Amino acid sequence: MRASQQITEAEATDLTTRSRAMMDLNLKLQASVSKAQTKTIDIELERMDAQEASQHLSILKLYLPEYFEGEKNGILALLRFKRVSFKASLMISTMRERFPEQTSDPAVVEDGFTAHDALEKLMWIASICDRFINYITNCSAESFDRIKATLFEMEPVERTMNFWIESIRKNELNMKKCGIELQRSIALLSHLAEVHLPTSLETFADELCMRSSLTQSYIDHAASLISRLRTLLQTKISIPEGEEEETKFLFSKMETLVTQARGLKVAMGKIHKALEDLRSRSLALSQDIAGPFKKTEEAAKDLSELARHLGENIALIVSDESRTEPLTLEEATKSMSQVSTLYAQPSESGSECSDTMSFIANRLRSLGGNLEELDSISTDLSITSEFERLPSPWIARASELKSNKAVSPDADEEIRRLKNEIHEASTALGVKDKTIEEQALKVELVESRMQEASKKASMVKELENKIETMRAKETEMESVVEKQRKDLQALETERQEIKARLDRVKRASGTTGITTTEGVVVDNALSLATMRENEALRAEVESLQAAVRFLREENRRADMLDPYSVQRSAEMYSWLDVPLTQANGNAQRDKIQQTASESRDVFTHLLKLTKESNICDLKSTMSQENGNRAGWRPSKTKLRYQVLQQRENFEHWTEWRDDIVNQEREQDRLVNTKKERLARDRARRHAPKNSVFGGFPQGLGHGMMGRAWEILGMQQDHRKLADRPVEPSITPSF
């Protein structure tokens, strides 16, 4: 009974606790619903205001003059800088809510170290955008006209911010990749700051405020990272018996470092507030004191990176799934010592770096000294200078346009008159331009005609020179013809004399013993010599007759044709000098050229195959998705298909080469067979023959006419034609 009563009381207590928890959850849910409804109402009202403002702006744009177009890009650049700064601040607040400092979730603790890198880069982007906003708001009209180029250069930065905000909304944030992308945006913004932000007191004051704000955030992050590392070590380190004091000492030292860092953060906040106060009063410190601020910022950034590196290294060791033993204090201390050694300066000894907490304490102490120096500098009004804060450029531009708009009616009339004069002057200039173009065309026409006339004059001069040359040649040819006529008359006289002698010899050759006019009898031997002489004279007479016919024909041509008739006739009958077997030679040459061309094509195709054929990559046989060779993939990517394709191409080339080689060998065999058959026929048909003329002298090479034929260059040709053997005009055909 008592046991059942105790169980009933326990169940009742449990039910009461659960009912209270349910009631609390219902109350929280109702409160969240009411807040959501209120927020929805506010959002809808803000949307209505935005739509109304957009419509109002679109209506106002219709009344604005066209000169607003020149100022639009600068205003859009200012709005883009504001959007980037707001989005960076929004990402910072969202990431801090997602990775709180006090949490028990191990995944959040491990990713929190990497998130601080992205937070620092987002803080830098927001600060530099604020510098641009302050500069654009108070710059001159000329500087505002130059700043419009940043509108398009800032587009990739805003696109990066939109992408990572969407990733945060979808809970797909990758901190390492986000840090890399933000580093690229930082490089772009640094370049824009060097190009567009001038060196002045106002921009220097903004720079000091930015450095102090970043230094404060670096110190805050260092304190948060050390606190997060302390929480991680408390949950992951296994404390054996006897080492509780060392572990407690380490945790207490880390807590002391966190407290010191937060104190330095408060001191840096005071310095930042002093700088903001100076800037609000249009005062700026001297540019000579930029070194301490830069040095302090770098020291705070190094401290934050050291703390983040320590936390990432410990988180990597803890998250190693291959570990079977828990993390020990000695292993954690050794890992932190290795990391602190990487950040040690050359002046620091190894013993100082081995104790990480002492190393961080020394860095905090040095940073505290730098903050004391900055505090004294920021409160010293003797080194400050006042700068002039200009009104916004769009205000100055609007005032200028308003003052220009207030013009008297007389000025309007003068402007209208001047516009009419300008229009008339432009019309007159157009007419003059047209007249000048016409005159230029006429000048070009005259110049072209002058060039043609000069060409014709040079051609006439050349023709006159040619006519003089032709007249000189005509005179020379007339003298040659006269000389040939005289030679012809002399030859006819000689012919008559030879004829007379021949008649006398014929009359005297009728008997064996010839009686002369003086009564002397000629014997038989002398009669035989006379007969031989008659034969020689008869041959010489025939030669003289042929020469006379030739000279008469030449004389007739010289009388009928122009001086160039000999050259013209030579050109007309030049086709007779071409051998009869020329066509077959051309065909054979074409065949050889065709064979050479095919051989070159074969060799070129071989070079193409060696260039296009690649060694098959065995890695390509694996599937890209899961790395499995048995998976499906296209047939053209398979190794067997590639090898067979290359083998098929090579076999096609081999067949082509063998066809050409076999064809040439067959043609060579046919040519050799025909040559052997022709040689046998020639040896059988043509037997050696004796000379027709025997030992007697031949007509063309004997006597006076022989000398004439030697002068004309015809004796050797006739002898060569007589002695040349008959060659068959048959050539092998392919």
Image: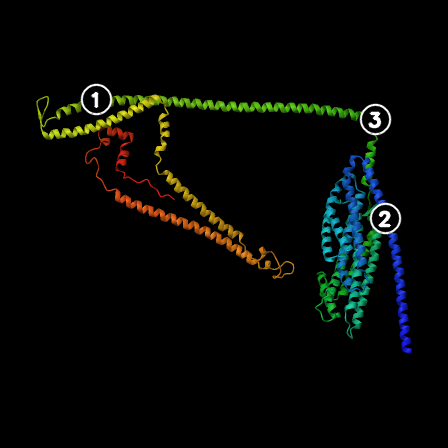
Q: Regarding mark 1 in the picture, which secondary structure is present there? A: helix
Nearer to us of marks 3 and 1 is 1
The answer, for residue 236, to whether it is visible in the render is yes
In this figure, which residue is indicated by the disc labeled 3? Answer: 409
Q: Nearer the viewer, mark 3 or mark 2?
A: 2
In this figure, what is the number of numbered marks?
3
Q: Between disc 3 and disc 2, whose residue precedes?
A: 2
How far across and how far down the image is residue 369, in percent?
80, 58
Please provide percent x and percent y for residue 637: 59, 56
Q: Earlier in the sequence, mark 3 or mark 1?
A: 3
- Judge left or right: residue 336 versus residue 572: right
Identity of the amino acid at label 3? Pro
Q: Is residue 369 visible?
A: no
Residue located at (26% from left, 44% from top) = 684
Please state which of residues 493 and 20 is positioned toward the viewer in this rendering. 20
Marks 3 and 1 sit apart, C-alpha to C-alpha, by: 128 Å
Disc 3/disc 2 C-alpha distance (Å): 50 Å
In this rendering, the answer to whether 426 lies above or below 599 is: above
Q: Amino acid at mark 1?
A: Gln
Please tell me the numbered disc located at residue 496: 1
Residue 672 on image: x %, y % = 34, 47
Of residue 160 and residue 62, the one placed in the foreground of this image is: 62
Mark 1, other Cα within 10 Å: few <14 / some 14–19 / many ≥20: few
Circle 3 residues within 10 Å: few <14, some 14–19, many ≥20: few
* Placement of 547 over or under 260, stated as above or below: above
Residue at position x 53%, y 56% in the image: 644
> What quarter of the picture does the N terminus occupy?
bottom right
Residue at the disc numbered 2: 44
